[in-house]
């Protein structure tokens, strides 16, 4: 589960550095209670919150994700591995561990954090998670677009999430922009049913 992987990472790094929850709370301007909830897998922090915590611990986001379960070894047969294609480079990433422990997160976050592709891939993982973390996915896709404004697939995925949330005007805007950037796309669009306030 995503929340538990983040919690394990936070606890591992915090304890490795000998920092109390209260001390980390002071460094991040978050409450010790919020940090405890993350450590216990009771909440899922936003990307910006994870960055703030990682910075306070003196690590990158990639190192933050890599720190969890370093001692756990999972072996997955090649035929059972989950695959993720990166359209921009024609590369394919294979998850070498169980998706339930966040292995695919570690694979995607090992890439250069200044590149939009791993951030978009993180959004894809949020959407695919059992809890469908749409708000986190919107944040990830928006960040990928900030990094590369002409990233058509990130605009299209943002449109998908808005459609699933019933935010039809936002969905149409994102799809329109994706179409402007890649008019040759034959990708199907998510149907949108307006949400009720």
Image (cartoon, grey):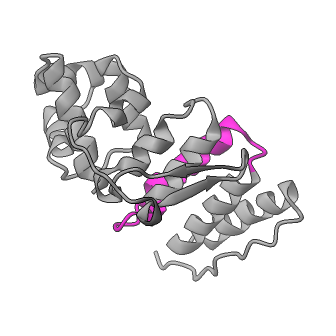
Q: Is residue 178 left or right of residue 193?
A: right
Q: Nearer the viewer, residue 188 or 81?
A: 81
Q: Nearer the viewer, residue 184 or 192?
A: 184
Where residue 110 appears, as percent x and y from the top left, is 48, 34
Q: Residue at x 22, y 26 (%)?
A: 13
Q: Is residue 63 left or right of residue 189?
A: left
Q: Can the viewer see residue 133 in this picture?
A: yes
In the image, residue 64 sits, relative to residue 195, either above or below, namely above
Q: What secondary structure is the stretch in magenta mostly built from? A: helix
Q: Is residue 106 left or right of residue 163?
A: left
Q: Residue at x 84, y 54 (%)?
A: 181
Specify the segment rendered in magenta: 127-151
Which image quadrant for residue 77?
bottom left
Is residue 130 highlighted in magenta?
yes
Report the quarter where the N terminus lies: bottom left
Q: Residue at x 34, y 31 (%)?
A: 64
Q: Residue at x 46, y 65 (%)?
A: 79
Q: Nearer the viewer, residue 181 or 112?
A: 112
Is residue 92 highlighted in magenta?
no
Where residue 97 appears, as percent x and y from the top left, is 35, 52
Which image quadrant for residue 25?
top left
In the image, residue 67 sits, relative to residue 86, either above or below, namely above
Q: Can the viewer see residue 139 in this picture?
A: no
In the image, residue 24 sits, relative to residue 6, either above or below, namely above
């Amino acid at each position: 589960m995503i929340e538990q992987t983040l919690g394990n990472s936070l606890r591992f790094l915090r304890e490795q550095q000998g920092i109390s929850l209260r001390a980390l709370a002071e460094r991040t301007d978050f409450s010790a209670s919020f940090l405890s909830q993350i450590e216990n897998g009771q909440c899922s922090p936003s990307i910006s919150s994870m960055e703030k915590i990682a910075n306070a611990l003196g690590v990158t986001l990639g190192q933050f994700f890599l720190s969890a379960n370093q001692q756990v070894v999972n072996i997955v047969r090649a035929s059972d591995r989950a695959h993720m294609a990166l359209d921009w480079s024609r590369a394919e990433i294979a998850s070498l561990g169980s998706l339930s422990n966040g292995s695919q997160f570690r694979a995607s976050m090992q890439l250069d954090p200044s590149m939009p592709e791993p951030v978009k891939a993180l959004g894809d993982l949020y959407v695919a998670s059992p809890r469908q973390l749409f708000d986190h996915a919107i944040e990830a896709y928006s960040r990928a677009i900030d990094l590369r404004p002409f990233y058509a697939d990130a605009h299209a995925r943002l449109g998908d999430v808005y459609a699933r949330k019933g935010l039809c005007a936002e969905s149409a805007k994102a799809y329109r922009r994706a179409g402007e950037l890649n008019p040759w796309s034959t990708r199907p669009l998510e149907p949108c049913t307006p949400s009720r306030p």
